[in-house]
Amino acid sequence: MPSEFEVLEQNLELNRLEYRSQRGYLRSRPRVLGLVLGNACNIDCPHCYQAKNQDNLLKPPEIGAELRREFAALYPFLSTLRIQGGEAFAYRGFREILDDVSAVVTRPLVSVSTNGTLIDESWAERIVRMPFSNLTVSLDGGTRETYNRLRRGADFDEVLANVRRVQRWKDKLQSPYPALDSFFVILRSNFREIPQYLAVAADHGFCDLTLQTAELTAENLSRHPGLAADEIISSREEAEELHTLLCRVLPAARRQFRMVRVSGLQTLFERFGLPSAFLDEQENGLYPDAETLAGPASELPDGDAPEPRAFELCPNPWTTLFVAENGDVHLCFLAAPTGNLYRQSLLDIWNSPQAVTKRVDMMAGRYMASGCSPLWCSWREGQRLQPPPPSDPPAAPVLLPILDHPAGPHISAVRRTAAELTRRVAELEALQQLHTGLQSAAQQHIDHLEAKVAKALADIAHLQQENALLEDQVQQQALRCLALSQALAAVPSRPKLRARLLTAVATRLAPRPTPPPPA
């Protein structure tokens, strides 16, 4: 039986070949699984995009236990298990997930995103002894004053002390793990401190950094209505100032650190017509564990195929499953959900029609139609790769069938209920569509009848007008007849005059033509 590391390498290689061959349906498993345990947090950040509704991926406990089993089935194939919150260290189920990982694999697998406030001595030791592969600490400021204002309830100096605690355990156990990363959300009130932030990161042993623009959501805007005006860079003047600053510091930072990723900055700068090539966001975007995907053209099925620039095609939907705290499953943490864990299993979602369609849309350059983020990914819209030459699919790893196990009874019941709900919703939508069609046909018939009534009313009005004219003519003729009769009675003894008068009377009584109806 292949070893743990052979299974991992087989999956990574198959995944790489399927990405390079632009497959829509994948036989490889995801190499990155992201889990958002919940949205509760021990500090308050005004710019946090999450809802604060106490959603918890692992509650109730009986469903959480079955979901952990489903997650664990993927661990042999993963290069990274990315865990976050809210605040991951504040969740009870976090320790159980770490125990699950230790029971399945021996390699460093867990990568955690944290605010760093809860890393005491015992946690620091476990982080290094396990070990975690990465520890990402969010630092949205280069000074204590700015950090403490943006991350209410946390203290800049205490968080950095916790980082140093982890470093001491790394030194004590002579371990390279975890690699220390940091995340910086760019806001109006902190972007001028990016140079200080870079210095702090270097002093505390961080190796990978990420600079990302903030996201406005209904959740953070409802909590802080003035957030957009106060913290979102929206003026040309500030965009130019940020552009100038990054042009100055980014090249040196990329020489100093292993990686400096950026996200959202290309969209921001292009909005104001500012050059963005220096960011190299296509190469240095948020692509978890994607470094090994790019390979020489000779390794493609057709060795003569042209070598595309790495990551011209965003790799995340080929590498990542990201599970939010409400069960929504994304093929990229920046994209719209593709399914929900309470309706389908992870592997069903991985190759669902929606997932395959998303990959195909992206290969065709239809990033926005595929559900990618307009804020962070609109610059990719229309980028289409030439399809690779036809080839036979690569061989699948031999251990993939071990994933075929039945779901637990509780999550199965939830999914059956969700499926029944989906069926009923579909029936209601079909009835609504039928009702809408009948309503449309009825309205058309009503419109036709109303048009006929309007025409009948117009005809009646015309006839009434003609009748009034005829009555007026009859009355006038009657008056003329009366006058002529009186004239004839006055001349009975003059036959010639009487004959002329009779002729005149006949002429006057002759019918007159009816005037045409009004247009």
Image (tube, rainbow, N blue to C red):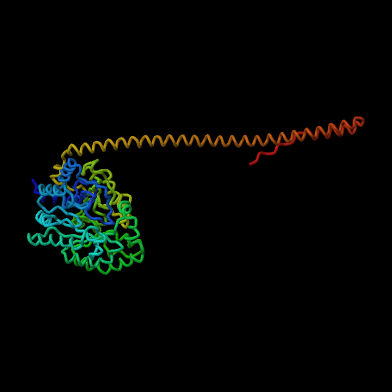
Residue 469 placement, left or right of 281: right
- Residue 493 position, x and y percent, is 92, 30
492 is higher (above) or lower (below) than 175: above
- Residue 158 position, x and y percent, is 17, 61
Residue 141 placement, left or right of 429: left
Residue 71 placement, left or right of 501: left
Which residue in the rendered view is the most extreme toward the front? 153
Specify whether residue 405 is in view. yes
Report the quarter where the C terminus lies: top right
- Residue 167 position, x and y percent, is 12, 61
Report the quarter where the N terminus lies: top left
Residue nearest the viewer, comparing 445 with 62: 62
Q: Count the numbered circles shown.
A: 0
* The quadrant where residue 142 appears: bottom left
- Residue 63 position, x and y percent, is 19, 41
* The quadrant where residue 416 appears: top left
Which residue in the rendered view is the most extreme toward the right? 493
Specify whether residue 382 is in view. no
Q: Which residue is drawn at 58% across and 36% down?
A: 455
418 is higher (above) or lower (below) than 56: above
Residue nearest the viewer, comparing 387 with 445: 445
Residue nearest the viewer, comparing 314 with 82: 82
